[in-house]
Image (cartoon, coloured by chain):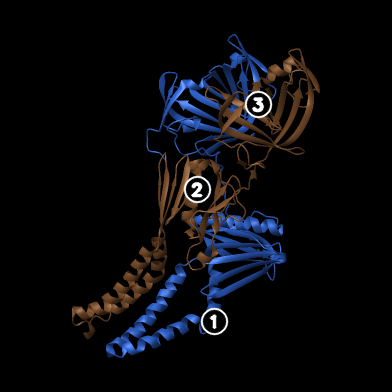
Chain colours: A brown, B blue
Amino acid sequence: MKLSLSRLELSATINWGRKHLTSILKKTLPLLGIGTIISLTAIPYPIFETWIKGFTFFGIPSLLYFGSSAILYLSKSKSKIRCTNEELYIQNGKEEFRIPTQQIAQFYLKYNSAKTRNSDQAKVDLMLLTKDSQEYDCFNGKGLPAMDGRELEDSLQQFLGIEDYYVEGEYQVKGHQKESLIESDLPKGESVGQILSFGTEEGIILKKFQYNWDHSSPDQMFWVETGETLSILYKKEELYHKEFKVNTTLFFREIGLANTISWEELPHIFHYKDELFELIEENSGRFLSSYAEKKEIPVQQKLYQNLQNKQLFRIVLYADLTIEISKS
Amino acid sequence: MNIIETRNGGYLFTLKGKLSKTLQDEYKKRLKEEENRDENSSFLILMLLMIFPVVLIHPILFSFIPISLISYYFGNRLYIKKKEETIKVNIFEGSFAINVHINKSHFFKHFDSNNIEQLYIRKIEQNKYCLCLIIKHPIRQQIALITGNEDKLAELVDLKNKIHNYFDIQEDELEGEFNYEKLELPKRKRQYFNLFHQDINDIRLNSVIHLKGNDHHITKINQLDWKNGMVSYQFTLETEEALFYHSSPAERLLFLEKEMTDINAIGLNPCQTELEGLDKILYHKGTNFYQTEQNKGKLFEGKTLLHDHVLQLLYENKEKQRFLRIFVLDGDTKAMLGEIVEEHQLQEILPETEEWN
């Protein structure tokens, strides 16, 4: 496998003929070598009286051996894989396959038992998992040596900045069980890289966060780049709320709890700049800061609303430590 | 290593590796008994019969028969010696078995799970490790199972842990046991470099950025992985200043910071390493700083973990223009004073000047 990596592109070429040839040569070359050495002991005998005869007994078997290897080498096809920041392109012989990199959730290796049985190495297939849970076999089950597969998987993931995690049934080359992950429950809908319109504005989604609540349907949050600023949108029940962060200390002072920042002491009703806010919803669950996370981040949220102008206060406690207050 | 959960609730592990010397000897002994009815030898006899008429052309060609036989024998020996076997480890309620297939013959070793005391990994020699098993009956003894080099080590550790988990075996520390420590790595940053639409992820070590009209060279990158899943970066510039990128779900901040030489100025005692009870409002040179966030996380320099639990308090002034970052490192309380950088002030990010990777 030839792997070349630059800042803009990752490309790899796999020559299946060479893979096959090396495995066959490994098996048979010691045999040929020992055979040759033993035959050399026959040199003093009259069988080697002329060079022509010598060639017949030495050269022809060798020629046949290397000739058949060459035919084998040429008859197998090549696979190419190319990855830029926008697209992954795979070519298997004459087949082509393209996928935008935004849709890739994970690469993983699957054990190919049929190919392994006839080989002295473990063989694996490189699988691609998309964010809408579709699976693709990158090389149509041709069976890559495990070490090469691992190298390719690892470089692809590093290139795209994908966190590595354990997929059910994955083959692990270097071992150390990868951690399982928590995937966002609702992969469909808006995804990173898409254009989102809200109110009179629109922008590109930079990041997508998800709150999976224990007792209600998940909410999402987006970072949207509108060209001028970064807008933070909270999506609740198909409605977008544009949010601004409020300083925690100032908030607690404003609602009359000077010199304390504490989640437990949050009241049910508070006055903020002469407006009354009431607690309308209390939730707990887990927070996912990207498509897939290794750790569950426990999160609690209190939602306050002013009943006249429908303004919202969202107070979130992440990992029982960090309090964040947003106003919308 | 491939792990399959079997239908009866057990596990089947498949790995390429080598059996230990003791098991290999046992296996070879058994192989010798089976060798006579090996299919391979019948194939060889058939080949000889086919070649025989050719050999009749010249009497000297007879010599090729012993030559081919000897070379076949040695070649096969060499091949088997080098080849890594496919080892199948099967665990199921009450039983633990190792199963190996070599050239259509197979070797089977079975242990009773009640008989297993524990498994452990031992370093035999340089770059050679062995997975060993201690059994209780008939006498307490150790049996070497699978050997492997450094590449295989992690796999063996996995196997050991999985078996311990499955049979609920209490692990005791043993003399001569090899402890494998897993590296902790920071959250991944993408490797590709955007030519257009650049963002903070494009800043690399030894790269040059154009900030507020000046070119700066990045000399060090620290990464902080926060407990809430967000990431912050500290890009140290050649001027001792640093560009700090902070992200929390509701906000993204970028500020240029410098270490405060005198932290008494904000009412902090350098010996004070407890940040919990710190004032929510700090005063420095005519500005009030209000605490906005406290967060815990892991600090990495490059890919090496420097600190496991770094507590950081973030303060900002009312206009959100100036920032104060306080944290404890190695029993030292440090404070960084920063001023906001608008995103358009960070204009050009050039790729790293030296060879990467």
**Which one is nearer the viewer's eye here, A17 or B186?**
A17
Q: Is residue B75 visible?
A: yes
| Residue type, label 2 | Asp
Give the residue at mark 1. B34
Judging from the image, what secondary structure is the residue with disc 3 in?
Answer: strand
Chain under disc 3: B
Q: Amino acid at mark 3?
A: Gln
Q: Position of residue B239 (x, y in %)?
A: 44, 22
Question: Mark 2 packing: few (<14 Cα in 10 Å), some, or many (20+)?
Answer: some
Disc 2 marks which residue? A154
Question: Based on the displayed image, in which of its 4 quarters is residue A70 positioned?
Answer: bottom left
Residue B192 - label:
none
Please say if the residues under marks 3 and 2 sit with CB atoms less than 8 Å apart.
no
Q: Which residue is mark 3?
A: B294
**Same chain letter for marks 1 and 3:** yes
In the rendered image, the vertical position of residue B225 relative to residue B251, given as above or below? below
Q: Residue at x 40, y 39 (%)?
A: B356
Mark-to-mark CA distance, 3 and 2: 34 Å
Local packing at callout 1 (Cα closer than 10 Å; few below 14, some 14-19, many 20+) is few
Quadrant in which the N terminus of chain A is drawn = bottom left
**Viewer-side label of 2, 1:** 2
> Mark 2 falls on what kind of element?
helix
| Image coords of residue B301 (percent x, y) | 51, 35
Outermost top residue: B286
Discs 3/2, front: 2
Which residue is nearer to you in this view: B24 or B101? B101
Q: Which amino acid lies under the numbered mark 1 shown in the image of this protein?
A: Glu
Tell me the quarter of the image containing the C terminus of chain A.
Answer: top right
The picture quadrant where one finds residue B143 is: bottom right
Within 10 angstroms of label 3, few (less than 14), some, or many (20 or more) residues? some
